[in-house]
């Protein structure tokens, strides 16, 4: 039965749907500005809007959906009331509308800042006490990372009158999201990879997402993000980026468990880690060779983030809605193809002659990926299984 | 056979891949080096990339390879001699309480003598040539390995030894399956420390006593105030040390200590 109330019965439904819709709408608006020169100039300029809304807003909705679905499961507690879902969704929406409105009405940007800040404070208030009361306290890294996201986002709005400095703060934003990605991926992969291993061979060595490896990667990412924000031109950034890439490749040691890697719901997060490592490696190499941070590397990290969000939407969306995982082969093939097209964005700076055509193809890959996700998730997010 | 090859390839791949953690740690070290270079300037400390580039340039000539080979030969000779003598004598001394008591003060004295003092003596005894660095490495590493072997042998489980004797387990089996695995857990850290030390000492000895090898090349670059070349040579030295440690010692250690994971 397709009713509006279904959408509010579980956090992942509404927030994953908002994630998908915003992925499509924000790319549409950015595409209009970039390719058709449609006037759009919010405070700080359209580029900062593009970065913030693709990173913070898109991930923000997915993070709320993930946290409010996962925390009750981790702690065996009751999920939050739908009233809170409506408040959070309202704040998220207010932030997006206010940022766009600031194109015409500049002070609206402060409304966007307030809405985003309140949204994260609400999320922290809803999740931290529950995770704190849990005896093991092994998930406290999640609210800590959220707190960092809150601080970084406030900094972004504070620096917005100085676009150069605001652009630097987006490095911190990206780093924080990468840390959140590692934390979330470790938790999801423990379940997904071990399920795949059990299906394949009962006596296989179990998969463990080992914390020391993850913590080393988090330390490297944090160091790189802080240094590239505070000393944007320093040579140290290149080495830190390479250290982060190596630390992420080190995490892959946990994943090398044989042919189970080829299972679709295992391969996707594995590729996400590869994309992250490639992104940091490119940032490091370009820093060493040219002394500057490449946008190609940043886009590879963004692609890793997007792959992870799609994975979370498809896996958590399917499982928690009661529909289970979509095992149709064409699903993963189509998404993988679209994601490959998206990688052209990272290559674009290397081919100046075909820069805009490559951007257009990458944007098409983005739209195609999310349209596919929307098609697949439509039923799982809007309907309850019979 | 195919399965064996597959397992060997897989183990090799996993071992190499596990090096990413060490790579990350080393890259963090390079970042700290870069920060120090930015603070103190290129004359005091050149940037890591400049040192790597210089090393790359140096390696395109035949002389550096010769110098690296000479240093490696001296370091490995001294290390292998101390490894053999230290391990055998240390295990021998550890077999009896009396020899342990006798040897400990002597080892303390040997450990207390700084390598540079041995170097001066070696220069008098062996003159300029291979003998001086090889002897200095040997005499500086010997007490470390001896002490590791002694400690490993002294801490063998007495009850386990008695049980082995009561059940008349053959001596070769006792040593292979009971004593040596335990002793190795003390010996390997000692070997590893001694190996690291051997490279440091051989360079110091070469710097003062020979006209070839990495130490001698460092002396030349120092006299030219060429800090980039000096760092390039230091990088060459550390790379060789890392290669020996991770290609030779670490796989051996994992193989010998595999019983710990199983137990």
Image: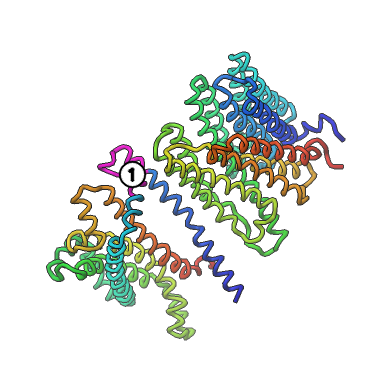
Q: On the picture, is A134 further left or further right than A319? A: left
Q: Which residue is depicted at the point 61% across and 16% down?
A: A108
Q: Quadrant of the C terminus of chain A?
A: top right
* Residue that extends furthest to the front in the rendered view of this protein: A353
Q: Residue at x 33, y 44 (%)?
A: B47
Note whether residue A321 is visible. yes
Q: Residue at x 46, y 45 (%)?
A: A285
Residue B64 image offset from top left, x and y in percent: 29, 60
Chain hosting mark 1: B
Compared across the picture, whether B1 is left or right of B147 comes to right
Q: Is residue A18 above or below residue A250?
A: above
For residue B169, side relative to residue A372 (left or right) = left
Magenta span: chief secondary structure: helix
Identify the residue under disc 1.
B47
* Residues in magenta, as a range: B32-51
Name the residue at the left extreme.
B124
Please provide percent x and percent y for residue A77: 69, 39
Work out whether residue A140 can be spotted: no
Give the quadrant of the N terminus of chain A.
top right
Rendered location of residue A155, percent (x, y): 51, 25
């Amino acid at each position: 039965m397709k009713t509006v109330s279904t959408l509010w019965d579980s956090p992942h439904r509404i927030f994953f749907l908002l994630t998908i819709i915003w992925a499509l709408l924000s790319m549409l608006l950015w595409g209009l500005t970039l390719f058709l020169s449609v006037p759009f100039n919010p405070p700080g300029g359209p580029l900062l809007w593009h970065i913030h809304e693709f990173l913070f807003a898109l991930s923000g909705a997915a993070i709320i959906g993930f946290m409010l679905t996962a925390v009750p499961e981790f702690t065996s507690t009751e999920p939050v009331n739908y009233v809170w879902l409506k408040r959070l969704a309202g704040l998220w929406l207010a932030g997006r509308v206010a940022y766009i409105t600031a194109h015409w009405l500049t002070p609206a940007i402060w409304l966007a800042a307030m809405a985003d800040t309140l949204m994260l404070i609400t999320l922290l208030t809803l999740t931290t006490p529950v995770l704190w009361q849990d005896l093991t306290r092994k998930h406290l890294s999640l609210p800590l990372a959220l707190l960092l996201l809150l601080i970084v986002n406030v900094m972004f709005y504070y620096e917005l009158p100085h676009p150069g400095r605001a652009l630097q703060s987006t490095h911190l934003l990206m780093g924080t999201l990468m840390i959140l990605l590692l934390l979330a991926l470790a938790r999801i992969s423990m379940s997904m990879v071990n399920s795949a291993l059990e299906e394949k061979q009962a006596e296989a060595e179990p998969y463990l997402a080992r914390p020391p490896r993850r913590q080393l990667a988090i330390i490297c990412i944090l160091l790189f993000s802080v240094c590239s924000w505070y000393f944007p031109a320093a040579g140290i950034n290149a080495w830190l980026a390479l250290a982060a890439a190596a630390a992420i490749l080190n995490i892959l040691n946990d994943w090398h468990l044989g042919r189970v890697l080829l299972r679709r719901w295992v391969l996707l997060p594995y590729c996400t880690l590869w994309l992250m490592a490639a992104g940091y490696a490119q940032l490091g190499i370009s820093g060493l060779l040219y002394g500057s941070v490449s946008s190609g590397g940043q886009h590879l990290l963004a692609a890793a983030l997007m792959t992870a969000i799609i994975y979370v939407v498809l896996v958590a969306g399917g499982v928690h809605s009661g529909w289970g995982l979509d095992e149709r082969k064409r699903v993963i093939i189509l998404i993988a193809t679209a994601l490959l097209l998206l990688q052209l964005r990272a290559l674009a700076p290397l081919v100046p002659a075909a820069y805009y055509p490559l951007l257009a193809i990458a944007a098409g890959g983005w739209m195609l990926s999310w349209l596919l996700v929307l098609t697949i998730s439509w039923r799982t997010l809007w309907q309850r299984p019979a | 056979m195919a399965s064996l090859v597959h397992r060997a390839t897989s183990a090799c791949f996993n071992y190499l891949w596990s090096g990413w953690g060490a790579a990350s740690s080393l890259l963090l070290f390079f970042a700290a080096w870069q920060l120090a270079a930015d603070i103190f300037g290129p004359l005091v400390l050149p940037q890591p990339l400049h040192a790597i580039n210089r090393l790359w340039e140096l390696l395109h000539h035949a002389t550096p390879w010769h110098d690296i080979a000479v240093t490696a030969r001296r370091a490995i000779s001294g290390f292998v001699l101390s490894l053999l003598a230290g391990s055998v004598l240390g295990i021998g001394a550890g077999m009896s309480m009396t020899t342990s008591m006798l040897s400990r003060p002597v080892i303390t004295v040997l450990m207390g003598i700084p390598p540079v003092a041995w170097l001066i003596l070696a220069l008098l005894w062996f003159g300029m040539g291979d003998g001086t660095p090889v002897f200095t490495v040997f005499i500086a590493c010997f007490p470390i390995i001896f002490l590791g072997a002694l400690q490993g042998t002294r801490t063998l489980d007495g009850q386990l030894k008695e049980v082995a004797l009561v059940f008349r387990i053959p001596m070769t089996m006792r040593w292979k399956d009971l004593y040596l695995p335990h002793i190795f857990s003390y010996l390997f850290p000692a070997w590893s420390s001694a190996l690291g030390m051997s490279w440091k000492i051989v360079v110091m000895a070469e710097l003062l006593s020979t006209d070839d090898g990495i130490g001698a090349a460092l002396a030349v670059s120092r006299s030219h105030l060429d800090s980039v070349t000096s760092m390039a040579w230091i990088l060459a030295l550390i790379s060789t040390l890392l290669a020996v440690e991770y290609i030779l010692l670490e796989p051996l250690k994992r193989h010998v200590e595999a019983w710990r994971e199983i137990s």
